[in-house]
Structure formats: structure tokens, C-alpha cells
Image (cartoon, helix red, strand yellow):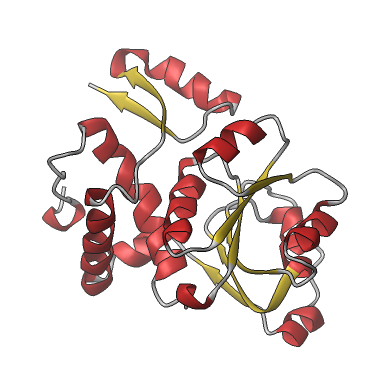
Amino acid sequence: MPAWTIAKKIESQSYEEAAAAWCQYLTAWGGLVYNSDIEKRNCCIFTGASSSAAIGGMQIVKSFGLQAYAISRTLAKKEKLLNVGYDEVLSLTDPKLEENIMDLTNGIGFDLAYDCVGGEYFINLLNTAKPQALIINYGNLNLNSSNIKTLPLLAKRIHIRFHSIFDTMRFQNQREEGINWINDKIKKRILKPIISKIFHLDDIVDAHKYLAEGNQLGKTIVVT
């Protein structure tokens, strides 16, 4: 492995926590913190809310004092999502999703979103974003098309950014800044990975089955 892809483990971390940290936190730092004016924003919407990526992003925005609203496919994990730190939980498939988002934001709309679903549901975010909101898309779990027109985007001056961890890793200054920021927050226990389950490499098939079931909350770790 190239040396620049390796980050030193913090002494207080377990190896499992160290393995769980980087993909979620560095992706979220690059999308939500770096060049995003996060200090000026009030709330953030998270789709795919039970994923480690979304939970990592939630912990980050909460450290800036933002409200964090989870959108999960159903409400089956609502209590668990509230327990890990979200302020409210909505269902992605609820026909009243847009109405519920507007109720949560006092009719104003959200000003930041961290989206891994995309597809046909992306229009719901565009319709409930406040003027000059920022939507960061880092995934495409829904492969269907969305009926998006240009005029509403122009009228509200919505900013849309597509982001991957590699957009941070390939630039030395961003990579080092992000790693230093995350390590500082982990040392202060502001960020702490949520580990859903740990498997041994011998049980890798079971690990994949566990992920396929979609019942995890946080990171799934495989150890050797």
C-alpha cells in the first residue's frame, strides 16, 4: 500500500474502532466540513441514516451544533437511530415525506443534506431544500430516474456536490487536514465509531449475508 494511504492508530482506539473510522469520517469531513460553510448552517438531512457513513456524518454535524434528521427506508430502526444521536427520524417511503421535512424545519426547509440514495428520491430533497441549501450526494442506492427540472434549482440557487473519499485523499493538503481534524475529534471522544457487528475472516460469508439483510446499524468489521 502507498504510505500516504495509511493513518496512525490513536493509542486509545481499539483496532476495530480504527478500522471503522476512516472511510466514514473522512468522506463526511470532505463533503460536510471542507469548503461547505457548515458553521453557518442549522440542520442536516441524512438519507441511508443507519449506515456507518451517515452516522459518521451525523456525529460531525452535531459537533458543530446542527440538528441532524435521519431518513431511513422505514421506521423500524427509529428508536435505535434516536439512541445513536439523531434528533428525529422520517421514513423515505412515506408519501408525506416532503410535508414531514417541512414540518421539522418550520416550513423553511433544510440547508444541508448528506445523501447516499439519490435516484427517484432526489426530487424530495430538491423540493424541501431552502434557498442556497447544499446537497452532498455520495451514493446512488436507488437506480431509478428522478423527474428534475432546472427552474426550481435556479430559483432557489441550490448547490449540489458529488463527493467521494477519493476527492479528499488525492490532494495532500486536504488529506492531511482531514486526518488531523478527525484524529483530534476522536481523541476528544467527540467522534466514536458505532460498530454493529464484528466477524472473523473465516466467517466472511456470514458477514456478507448480514450486510445483505440490511439490519445493521453502523459499521460491520471483519478481523483476521
How many labels sit on residues? 0
14 relative to 211 in the view: left or right: left
97 relative to 24 in the view: left or right: right
Name above or below for residue 188 compared with residue 129: above
Q: Residue at x 43, y 17 (%)?
A: 205
Q: Residue at x 74, y 51 (%)?
A: 144
Please state the horizontal and vertical placement of residue 129, each as a whole percent of the image. 71, 70
Q: Nearer the viewer, residue 75 or 170?
A: 75
Q: Residue at x 38, y 19 (%)?
A: 204
Q: Nearer the viewer, residue 204 or 79?
A: 79
Name above or below for residue 211 compared with residue 144: above
73 relative to 2 in the view: left or right: right
Farthest residue toward the right?
95
* Residue 35 occupies quadrant: bottom left
Please state the horizontal and vertical placement of residue 202, each as a whole percent of the image. 31, 13
Residue 187 seen anywhere in this rendered image of the structure = yes
Q: Nearer the viewer, residue 213 or 98?
A: 98
User: Which quadrant, please, contains the C terminus?
Assistant: top left
Residue 146 seen anywhere in this rendered image of the structure = no
Name above or below for residue 58 compared with residue 76: below
Q: Residue at x 51, y 48 (%)?
A: 54
Please state the horizontal and vertical placement of residue 109, each as a whole percent of the image. 73, 69
